[in-house]
Amino acid sequence: MPNNSSVSEFLLLAFADMRELQLLHFGLFLGIYLAALLGNGLILTAVACDHRLHTPMYFFLLNLALLDLGSISNTLPKAMANSLWDTRAISYQGCVAQVLFFASLAGTEFSLLTVMAYDRYVAICKPLHYRSLLGSRACAQMAAVAWGSGFLNAVLHTASTFSLPLCHGNAVDQFFCEIPQILKLSCSDSYIREVWALLFSIFLAFSCFIFIVLSYVQIFRAVVRMPSEQGRHKAFSTCLPHLAVVSLMVSTGMFAYLKPPSISSPSLDLVVAVLYTVVPPVVNPLIYSMRNQELRDSVRTLLEYTHLQQIHL
């Protein structure tokens, strides 16, 4: 019975077998990756450089942009390299690193989205207590807890997953390494412990989701009671982008992990994985910039300043 010590590399699922399609996938994902880098990079730079955006909401948005950059950089470059060089291989250490960072960033992002829901709840439902409840120190502590809990949870899952003996080869049915796919390679009598750990993480994620839903129930009740139409519009403009990001993450993640086995297939799993790993980091900057006038103005000022600098050079 082979175990982890006999596995030096894993074989990822290829997007296509034809060379022309492989190069097409490389070009397509290169464009997507550059768009994600540009969009999230602009948000990071705008929030960091514009003092008007030095508020809790934009501080958490900056963290979200960092997570999106890390998430897409963890999976897409390796997939692009495999398509370009016509290979499926990823080293054992590289697979461990992908699982660790993917689990860490996903857990941190959901925790951060929960914190952002709390930020919007306090801002709209308890505006007089906003500065006392969400000072700079409190924001830094909440962000640190989100990052720390996500990383600790990922370390425990990664260590548990890769300590299992592998009995079913080294071919991973996904374009990147993820825990459910590694568990399929493990011995059937050895992975129950990790399955229970995954179920516990799902329970925690569901608890965060319930908190977000309850927060927005209170938020929408408060917004409806606002006498000013301008106030309602401003409240919706700061809440709807966050709600859209949460909906995108939850819907794609639930479909990926909770869909019936009867409709599961390698090609469908591949498409769904792209939806929940590649699409959100690209779409999130667009979602936040479309309805947020302050952020649009800051990004526009940043682009104009960069253009003027290039002209002077």
Image (cartoon, rainbow, N blue to C red):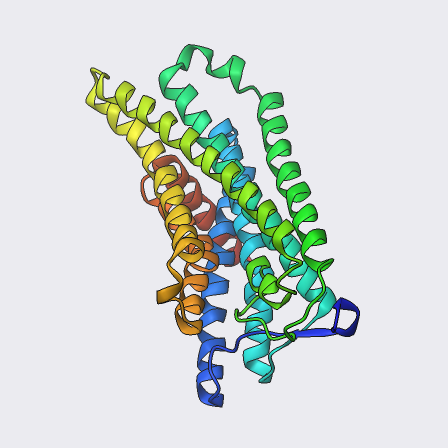
Residue at 23% over, 24% down: 230
In this rendering, would 98 be left or right of 60?
A: right
- Residue 129: % across, % down: 46, 11
Decide: is 8 above or below 163: below
Residue at 65% across, 49% down: 157
Residue at the outermost front position: 189
Residue at the (65%, 74%) spot, across then down: 170
Q: Quadrant of the C terminus?
A: bottom right
Quadrant in which the N terminus appears:
bottom right
Residue 117 at x, y percent in the picture: 43, 30
Task: Decide which of 290, 207 is in the foreground and name it.
Answer: 207
Seen from the viewer's position, the closer of residues 106 and 189 is 189
Is residue 284 left or right of 46 when viewed as pictured?
left
Q: Quadrant of residue 137?
A: top right
| Residue 308 appears in the figure | no
Farthest residue, direction top = 128
Q: Nearer the viewer, residue 242 or 190?
A: 190
Q: Position of residue 236 (x, y in %)?
A: 29, 31
Visible in this render: residue 65? yes
Residue 47 pos. (x, y %): 51, 38
The residue most toward the right is 5
Vertical side of 135 occupied by 202: above or below: below
Please give the count of numbered marks on the rendered protein. 0
Horizontal placement of 261 versus 204: left or right? left
Q: Residue furthest bottom?
A: 19
